[in-house]
Image (tube, grey):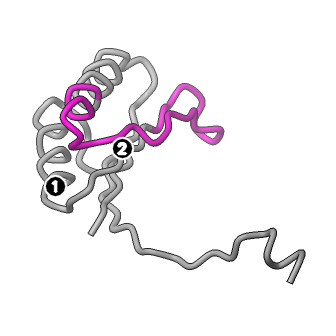
Amino acid sequence: MEALVLCEIAAGRDDLREALLARIGRLGLGGRAKLSFVARDRNAPGNTIVAAGFPRQAEAERFSAEAIGDGHDPGAIRLLAVEPAWQAEPLPLMFP
């Protein structure tokens, strides 16, 4: 099952942000991870959210543990299981 890791990085911790993005980049070269998005938190100015997708849960768990070892707050990392969802294509619905 696919997994998604959300990491919230506190304002002023550009070192953690860059280290996290570098790790995702290295894993991405081997097809073991994919950067999903980087966003700024509107409710906590300066904080950044980084999301990375993984093909397997075990890879995501290992990534989370390494991020915590690098100094990320364990409460700022969320591991999510991605569930497949059916979505209708818009054209067949418009032109049955």
Q: Position of residue 9 (x, y in %)?
A: 39, 33
Q: Residue drawn 49% across and 38% down?
A: 37
**For the residues bearing labels 1 and 2, Cβ distance under 8 angstroms:** no
Residue nearest the viewer, comparing 92 with 1: 92
Q: Residue drawn 60% across and 30% down?
A: 45
Query: Where is residue 61, by image quadrant?
Result: bottom left
Characterize the local packing of mark 2: few (<14), some (14-19) or many (20 or more) Cα atoms within 10 angstroms.
many
Quarter of the picture holding the C terminus: bottom right
Residue 29 falls within the magenta-colored stretch: yes
Quarter of the picture holding the N terminus: bottom left
Q: Which residues are magenta?
A: 25-49
**Considering only vertical position in the picture, is 77 above or below 15?**
below
Marks 1/2: CA distance?
12 Å
Q: Residue drawn 58% across and 38% down?
A: 41
The secondary structure type at the circle numbered 1 is: helix
* Image-based side of 86 in relation to 27, left or right: right
Q: Which mark is residue 52?
A: 2
Query: Where is residue 26, by image quadrant?
Result: top left
**Considering only vertical position in the picture, is 75 above or below 88?**
above
**Considering only vertical position in the picture, is 71 above or below 87?**
above
Residue 1 falls within the magenta-colored stretch: no
- Label total for image: 2
The secondary structure type at the circle numbered 2 is: strand
1 or 2: tag closer to the N-terminus: 2
Q: Residue drawn 71% across and 71% down?
A: 89
Q: Position of residue 28 (x, y in %)?
A: 27, 34
Which residue carries the number 1 mark?
A: 61
Residue nearest the viewer, comparing 50 with 83: 83
Amino acid at pointer 1:
Glu
Residue at the extreme front: 96
Characterize the local packing of mark 1: few (<14), some (14-19) or many (20 or more) Cα atoms within 10 angstroms.
some
